[in-house]
């Protein structure tokens, strides 16, 4: 094992006292995320896809289901599910309707979910 020679006497540096804390600039405060914003984006995308076709094929229905599951997963991961529970229930109903090949029922449930998500947004509450 080779010995290494330090250029600074460590003991003298430790005796000098505690080093001064690093000065950091204050972080700019981030705006709080809106509850259900990712679910709202998923609902809007699914509604746009459903409005472009009257009867979606299997791959399209699977894509819509994946989109809605992703939005539900984000809501669960961020703890928003309890804040937007009626909209979450409507999205789950829309997934069941899509699985049953009922795009009209899915569209109705998604419209109800979007309405529920719109009511939960603080910025829209203040502007009303």
Image: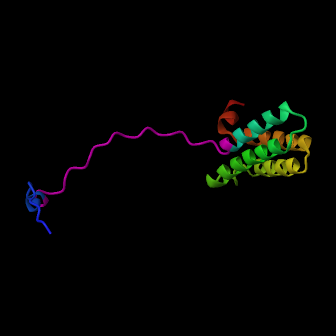
Residue sitting at x 11%, y 57%: 13
Give residue 81's position: percent from left, percent from top. Answer: 69, 53
Magenta-colored span: 14-38
User: Which is nearer the eye, 82 or 63?
Assistant: 63
Judge from the rendering whether residue 112 lies leftward or rightward of residue 8; answer left or right: right
Can residue 37 be seen? yes
Quarter of the figure that contains the C terminus = top right
User: Which is nearer the eye, 66 or 72?
Assistant: 66
Does 17 appear in magenta? yes
Residue sitting at x 10%, y 58%: 6
Q: Quadrant of residue 57?
A: top right
Residue sitting at x 72%, y 49%: 84
Q: Give the vertical position of 94 relative to 6 (above or below).
A: above
Judge from the rendering whether residue 63 lies leftward or rightward of residue 73; answer left or right: right
Give residue 18's position: percent from left, percent from top. Answer: 18, 56
Judge from the rendering whether residue 45 lies leftward or rightward of residue 101; answer left or right: left
Judge from the rendering whether residue 116 lies leftward or rightward of residue 78; answer left or right: right
Main SS category, magenta section = loop
Residue sitting at x 78%, y 43%: 64
Q: Give the vertical position of 32 relative to 13 (above or below).
A: above
Indicate the colouring scheme: rainbow
Give residue 104's position: percent from left, percent from top. Answer: 91, 40
Does 1 appear in magenta? no
Give residue 123's position: percent from left, percent from top. Answer: 65, 35
Can residue 119 be seen? no
């Amino acid at each position: 094992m080779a010995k290494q020679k330090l250029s600074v006497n460590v003991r003298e540096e430790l005796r000098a006292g505690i080093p001064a804390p690093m000065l950091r600039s204050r972080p700019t405060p981030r705006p709080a995320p809106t509850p259900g914003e990712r679910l709202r984006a998923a609902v809007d995308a699914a509604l746009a896809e459903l409005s472009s076709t009257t009867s979606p094929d299997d791959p399209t229905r699977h894509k819509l289901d994946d989109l809605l599951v992703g939005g539900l997963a984000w809501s669960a991961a961020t703890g928003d599910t309890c804040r937007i529970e009626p909209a979450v229930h409507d999205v789950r109903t829309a997934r069941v309707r899509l699985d049953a090949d009922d795009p009209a029922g899915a569209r109705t449930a998604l419209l109800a979910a979007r309405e529920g998500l719109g009511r939960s947004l603080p910025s829209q509450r203040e502007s009303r």
